[in-house]
Image (cartoon, grey):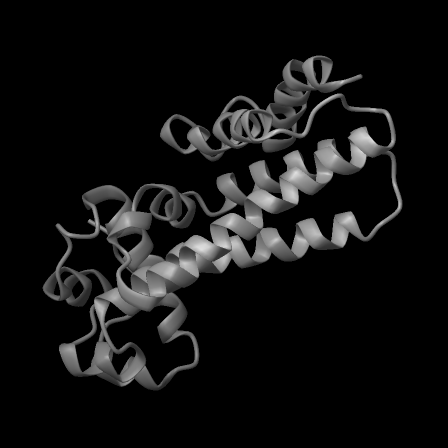
Amino acid sequence: MVKTNATSDGDANTGGSKERIFKVAAELFATRGFHATGMADLEKATGLGRGALYYHISSKEELLFEITSRYLRELLNAGDALLATPMLAEARFRRYSGVVMATIVDHLAELTVCFREVHSVVGERKLELLELHRQYERVWTDILKIGVAEGVFHTADSLAVKAVLGMHHYTYLWIRPGGRQTPEEIANFFCELMLPGLKA
């Protein structure tokens, strides 16, 4: 069972309550699934009553959207910053691989929900989330395209990008924080596998 230090409705007035709700919801959605988690489960796990929960969030769907979009935005910002920074194409590829792996390991529950529950988001939020996924994929595409333009990589086609995405993203199924290899070591291993096939 997921637990936090929150114990009463009065705790709803503290600044960190919404963040704790966010973290607890991510753990529940990651372990049980979004549709199998109800508001009663969130109440029990946070120690907050229904009124306190709704003081901070409007719905379970709002929580899902925040969980599935937050770290995509952070990865986008990090990727755009790398694209704007002069560096060798291979170094940029390696750096972004490391950023992605560190984010997955540091926020495993949230990224598990992000990759697995994207189709549970509905309405306008789903359109916004899918656009975030497209923009994130565009970062990887641009990293490869710059490398092609510089004569370092030989391809930036969609199949190559999908291969890069798949290798990184499916780690959520098996990776464990505090495991034998660090996120940096895993990213380096992935790069050693991928870069020889990408280089011109």
Q: Residue at x 28, y 65 (%)?
A: 123
Where residue 5 sits, quadrant-wise, is: bottom left
Residue 28, percent across and down? Answer: 24, 51
Q: Is residue 111 visible?
A: yes
In the depicted structure, whether residue 57 falls above or below residue 82 = below
Q: Residue at x 35, y 65 (%)?
A: 125
Residue 73, percent across and down? Answer: 55, 58
Quadrant that contains the C terminus: top right
Residue 170, percent across and down? Answer: 43, 29
In the depicted structure, whether residue 27 falls above or below residue 173 = below
Q: How many numbered tags mark residues here?
A: 0
Q: Residue at x 72, y 31 (%)?
A: 94
- Report the front residue among 119 and 184: 119
Is 100 left, or right, of 29 in this rendering?
right
Is 65 left, or right, of 34 in this rendering?
right
Q: Residue at x 52, y 30 (%)?
A: 162
Residue 71, percent across and down? Answer: 50, 54
- Report the front residue among 120 and 178: 120
Where residue 26 sits, quadrant-wise, is: bottom left
Q: Is residue 95 visible?
A: no
- Report the front residue among 41 and 165: 165
Is 194 left, or right, of 10 in this rendering?
right
